[in-house]
Structures are given as C-alpha cells and as structure tokens.
Image: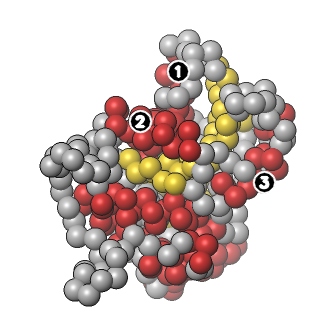
Amino acid sequence: MRPADVKPDTWLVVAGRPATVPGAPLNIPIGPASNFVLGGDRTYSRNEATEGWEAFEAMLGGLEGGAAVAFSSGMAACAAVLGQLATGAHLVLADDCYQGVAAIAQDGVSAHQWRVERLPVTDPLWLQRAGEADLLWLESPSNPLLEVADLAAICTAPRRSGTRVVVDNTFATPLLQRPLELGADIVVHSATKLIGGHSDLLLGAAVTADTDQLALLRGARGLGGATPGALECFLALRGARTLSLRLQRAQGSARQLAARLGEHASVARLRYPGFGTIVSFELRDAASADRACRATHIIRHATSLGGVESTMERRSANPGQEHIPAGLIRLSVGCEDLEDLWGDLQAALRAG
Ligand SMILES: *Cc1c(COP(=O)(O)O)cnc(C)c1O
C-alpha cells in the first residue's frame, strides 16, 4: 500500500507491517542485528537499515511525503544535515530554536567555519535570504516562544541554486504540517517527542524527497554511526500508531487550557499558536515560575515534551536560553483528563 492510497490516520496504522501472508505476525518483530550472512541485501547494520528501521522509516517518510532516514536521536539527524554545510557557508537560523541546533551553529561560528544569522521566524527577511544564503533552518512553531513561520511563502521564495530549506517539524508533526509539500528540502524530527509519544526512547529522522540528499543522509548515518536501535524503532512505530488519537486529545486540551490560562490573573502573557500540544505562559518572574513548576501533582516537572504524560518547566532555567522571558513556563499537554490538568495548573498558579 502507498501513502497516497489512504488518509494519514490510516497510514499511521497500516504502514511498516510485514506482508500479509498466512501466519505472519502483524508487527515486524524486534530484530537486533549487526551482522548478516554475505550475499544478500544486508551486510552490516551501520550501513544498511535493518527491517525494523525500515518499517519506522516507511511510516514517517510516507507521512511527510518523502523518504525518511532514522537516526539515533533528533540531534543526530540535525547534526547530519548541518554537517553537509561547506566552510564559508551562510546559515540562517531561527532565533528561537532547539538549543542543541543553536549550539552546533555557534560552534561553527567559533571555528570560523560558517556565517550564522539568527532571525525571528516571523521576519520577512527570510524571503530575501532564500535568494542569498546556503541553508535556511526553520522551526515552526518555534521553541518555546511558539511563533509561526509562513513556511509556504519562505519555501517558495525565489532561491539561489543550491540553497536548501530545512524545517524542524517536531512540534507540529506531519499530521498538522507537511513542509516538503510546501517546498522544503529536508524535514527533521525528534521522534523522541510526539511521534514516540511515551517518553521512553530517543530517536530522530531526516526526511527528504530528493534522491541525492537521501544518499547523503544515509552516508552520513553510516559514517557518523548515529544509527537507531532496534528497540527504539519498534517502540517509536508502536507509539506512532496512536499519534493521531494522542494529538487530537492533547491538542483539544491544549486549546482549552490556553484559553483558561490566558484569562488567569497570574498569567502575564500566554503564547499558543492555535494548534499543537505545547502551550507557553509567563508568570511574574523566575521564582514564581519555579514555585509553580514544583507545585504540580499530575503534570511532571520535566524538560521534554510530546508524551502522553503532561510536563512543564521554566525554559530559561536551561543554558543558552537567555532570550526567553525569565518567568516563561513551557507546558506540554498530554492525554490526562482536561479538568484534572486544569485543577493541577490552578493549584500551581496559586503556589506561584
Ligand atoms: C528535542 C528536540 C530536538 C532534539 O531531539 P533529541 O531526540 O532530543 O535529540 C530537536 N528539535 C526539537 C524541536 C526538539 O524538541
């Protein structure tokens, strides 16, 4: 079956299954393997994907409209893409983006390797930079300010030949936004987050519809050795089966909680783009945000996001996040009951 034959929700369920022959299991079994008998398609699993990775890649690639290359983490996927940048390259990077990506870019600047320009994702200058820079790296909604880029306009702006556009689609997931269809060259994911969905694995991917780019990404994975694990691919594919259900539930709650937080006297500013499962809100100051984060009983005080369990943290407590307002809390809404979450948040706000 091809992804175009069915709706994305169906694809999530049917993708990456063994052939339907009598007696076959419904899921590709977890198959740890490094070495294969010579003479077949696989020799050594740093170089050729195992069946389990391929199943995960088929699911994600089909969903994004390209071919996916799974990596051991989201950062490994990001590093493989950034590693293609030549010396002297001009990289334009969202000013509010994943701190690990910003740190790699900063290393490139410190080593006099690349020229890096940071822009708010809403800045119209992106359109101009499409015609000038070597690589545009966007994250939308951005993390954690949740600003939304006009991806369609940026991806279709006239480009210099060779300029590539990369979109980190971790927050939106391909169910809410498909950047390759809008004209992006590469989509990167931290499947650790919503795709895996259960805070029990690290996994990443880069997705592209360009065959040369696909070969580069596979080559970078093979040489860099940032290969995914068999168990991680199995769990992420299993998690992805319910991505649509989890997203619907969590997004519905996020919308409600955003509306209520926006009216709460303790919330100085609410940031929610109207879609997705992440809500950022600002309390008076860092101390107040810290008290609120420590006062919850259901929502875990934890850094990551996208799990069935709701989490929140004060983002400016992390290094390299100086641009973030001190009292900003990023809430990742999970699948618990909405009123339980609201009760927990109200108690946290009282403590703040
Ligand atoms: C977490 C995250 C990453 C990095 O992914 P890991 O799986 O933690 O390596 C990259 N981009 C975004 C938007 C993320 O949230």
Write down the residue under mark 1: 108
Residue 336, relative to residue 43: is it above or below?
A: below
Q: Amino acid at mark 2?
A: Gly
Label placed on residue 152: 3
**Residue 266 in the image, given as x and y percentages of width and height:** 62, 65
> How many angstroms separate mark 2 from mark 1 (CA)?
21 Å
Nearer to me, 11 or 243: 11
Nearer to me, 54 or 249: 54
Write down the residue under mark 2: 219
- Residue beneath the point at 50% across and 76% down: 1
Q: Is residue 51 left or right of residue 333?
A: left
Residue at the far front in the pictured view: 39
Task: Say whether residue 116 is visible.
Answer: yes
Nearer to me, 105 or 11: 11
Label 1 or label 3, whichever comes before in sequence order: 1
**Residue 336 in the image, given as x and y percentages of width and height:** 43, 81
**Residue 312 in the image, given as x and y percentages of width and height:** 46, 61
| Mark 2 closeness class: few <14, some 14–19, many ≥20 residues within 10 Å | some
